[in-house]
Image (cartoon, rainbow, N blue to C red):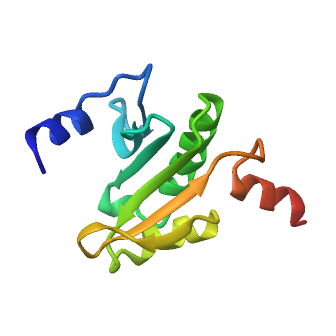
């Protein structure tokens, strides 16, 4: 990763990109347990997604909740799509994207590209499915 790319991922311009966190508060001090973010890509119409969830909190729906909120923000800002590069052995993250109706294609350096078009429906795929399913 280039220094420029690393700097872009670490520094968040919330007017352009978006970063959201999930905190728990078992005592007095809140603890960050998950982060989801997107960075606008080169064409300015899409955004790359990334997630980090603490090992002890995986499997609790944190990445799904962050994805839902990031999609909502991206849609409200007029983005056409969101996408992520996922390693083929990251089954849990691939499952999150699969449940939310992302399309899959080959990515760079052996990764899988998961992408979702944001044009059309005004709600996320997961929330639309919940409304249809009793």
Count of numbered badges drawn on the protein: 0
Inspect this view and state whether residue 61 appears. no
Task: Report the side of 21 relative to 45 (left or right).
Answer: left
Residue ranking furthest to the top: 15
Relative depth, front residue between 134 and 41: 41
Residue ranking furthest to the left: 3
Inspect this view and state whether residue 55 appears. yes
x, y percentage for residue 93?
44, 67
The residue drawn where x is 13% and y is 51% is: 1
Q: Is residue 57 above or below residue 91?
A: above
The residue drawn where x is 37% and y is 50% is: 50
The residue drawn where x is 62% and y is 31% is: 78
Occupied quadrant, residue 2: top left
Relative depth, front residue between 53 and 10: 10
x, y percentage for residue 46?
49, 42
x, y percentage for residue 97?
54, 65
The residue drawn where x is 51% and y is 71% is: 104
Residue ranking furthest to the front: 43
Occupied quadrant, residue 134: bottom right
Relative depth, front residue between 67 and 5: 5
Task: Report the side of 97 relative to 53 (left or right).
Answer: right
Relative depth, front residue between 131 and 46: 46
x, y percentage for residue 62?
49, 54
């Amino acid at each position: 990763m280039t220094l420029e790319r690393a700097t872009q991922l670490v520094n968040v311009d919330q007017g352009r990109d978006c970063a959201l966190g999930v905190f728990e508060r078992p005592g007095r001090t809140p603890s960050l347990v998950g982060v989801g973010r997107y960075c606008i890509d080169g064409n300015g119409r899409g955004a790359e997604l990334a997630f980090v969830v603490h090992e002890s909190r995986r499997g609790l729906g944190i990445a799904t909740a962050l994805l839902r909120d990031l999609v909502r923000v991206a849609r409200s800002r007029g983005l056409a799509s969101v996408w992520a590069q996922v390693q083929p052995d990251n089954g849990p993250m691939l499952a999150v994207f699969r449940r939310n109706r992302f399309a899959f294609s080959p990515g760079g350096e052996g990764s899988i590209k998961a992408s979702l078009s944001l044009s059309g429906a005004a709600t996320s795929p997961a929330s639309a499915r919940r409304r249809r399913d009793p």
